[in-house]
Image (tube, grey):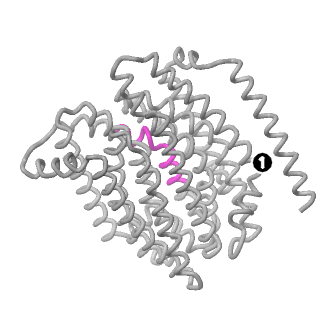
Amino acid sequence: MFIKGFFSNSVGIMTSRILGLVRDLLTASILGAGIFSDLFFIAFKIPNLFRRIFGEGAFTQAFLPNFTNNKKKAIFQAEIFIKFLLFIGVLTLLVNLFTPYFIKIIASGLSEQNITDAVPLVRINFYYLALVYIVTFMGALLQYKGHFATTAFSTALLNLAMIASLLLARGKSESVVALYLSFGVVAGGILQVLVHLVAMKFNALNKIFWGGLSGYFKGKRAQSKGFFINFYHGLLGSSAMQISAFMDTWLASFLVSGSISYLFYANRIFQLPLAIFAIALSQALFPKITRLLKQKDEVNALVWTKKSFYLLLCALLAATIAGVVLSEFIIWLLFERGNFVRANTTECAKVLSAYLVGLTPFGLAKIFSLWLYANMKQKEAAKISIICLVINLILAVILMQKFGAAGLAFASSLGGFLQLILYIRAFGAKRFLAIIEPKFIAAIAVAAVLLYFGLTFLKDIFNANF
């Protein structure tokens, strides 16, 4: 099941990310890196932030262990579903009523005119939050059944809807393009919900889902306090990178126009290897680690952790080296067309390199964090996250003064190294040393050096001829 889950996740995420890059390519060509692209990315980042927190972090990591251990599974899942949906409904209403004030909080550097232009974009995009929560909830139930493919591939539907909206908006003003994109986000969310409903039926989960809702409305209740305690702690513990990215956007709103777009485009590329390897592997590994630790089988849990560690180390280190060496070429190839010009490529490449420095530590940290979540130690993970966020914010404010958007990205990477160190410490020095093989580490280091010089040589040949 682990291999199947990892493969399904990887292929699904790769498909979605490739379509995401096509979407970004069209966005860069039509919107470029100006004020309306900044405004759309601000509006889109809010539900996207929640998607990553729910889908890749706190919700699933708190839900699965509690759902697995709960004797009233149907009622338990119904209670969680309804309470979260009500909260999101109230939050959406408040954001729609007080949108300008909300925008001032998330992007304080915008002018009054920019805030006015952003209001409809934020309102439309925020409706995606309820849709993505439903998708994430159903995805967690499917994950319990060992079905990963639907959730992994469903993001492709969001990207297809946004690509369609961009094609329909071609030739229109930038403000209209941003509106079309926002409606595309909501349409994509609806499609994601529909395919998950189909997958729930085929995996015999309808009885649990709808039966649980029926029982809940009849007054039946399950013990859910433990879940909420774990969730609140895990909200910070599993979301350091997402909250850090959100803070980057806020700080970037004080920099020159286009800075938010550089961060967005560079982060999209950074997320590709992180998602294909680290997120896909950790999602497949988490149920296995949870079951093994529940059975007190720490030996086998450590074996799977070791295998995952070396797989991620090789994959992410290679992606880091390739990305840093070829950063300008990657940005040029993907985005330099239309309103996205050479100057934009140069600046965006700097941001990409700065982000990629933290790719390997961010990915490896996910593996070690699983032990905390599987043991329901979300509070300890939350402490680690708070420390990393504070240090990252301090570094971001300092580095942005001289290096602009690239300084914000590099501060995030430094925060990733700190996060890895603290998670290894929580994992335990004895356990960590048990998975370290000096010969493997030395071989990986030699391969990394050879890869760096090989890619640099090829890059020089390309530059000399073109």
Residue 185, quarter of picture: bottom left
- Residue 78: percent from the left, percent from the top? 20, 48
- Residue 459: percent from the left, percent from the top? 85, 51
Residue 361, quarter of picture: top right
In this picture, residue 272 sits left or right of residue 352: left
Quadrant location, the N terminus: top left
For the residue pair 3 and 130, the one nearer the viewer reads as: 3
- Residue 333: percent from the left, percent from the top? 73, 62
Query: Residue 235 in magenta?
Result: yes
In this picture, residue 37 sits left or right of residue 155: right
* Residue at the image point whose x is 60% and y is 65% from the top: 22
Q: Which residue is mark 1?
A: 325
The reply to whether residue 386 is in sight is: no
Q: Secondary structure at mark 1?
A: helix
| Amino acid type of the residue tagged 1 in the rendering | Val
* Residue at the image point whose x is 34% and y is 60% from the top: 193
Mark 1 is surrounded, within 10 Å at the Cα level, by few (under 14), some (14 to 19) or many (20 or more) other residues, namely some
User: What segment carries the magenta color?
Assistant: 232-248
In this picture, residue 56 sits left or right of residue 230: right
**As displayed, is residue 326 above or below residue 161?**
above
**As displayed, is residue 249 above or below residue 338?**
above
Query: Residue 448 in magenta?
Result: no
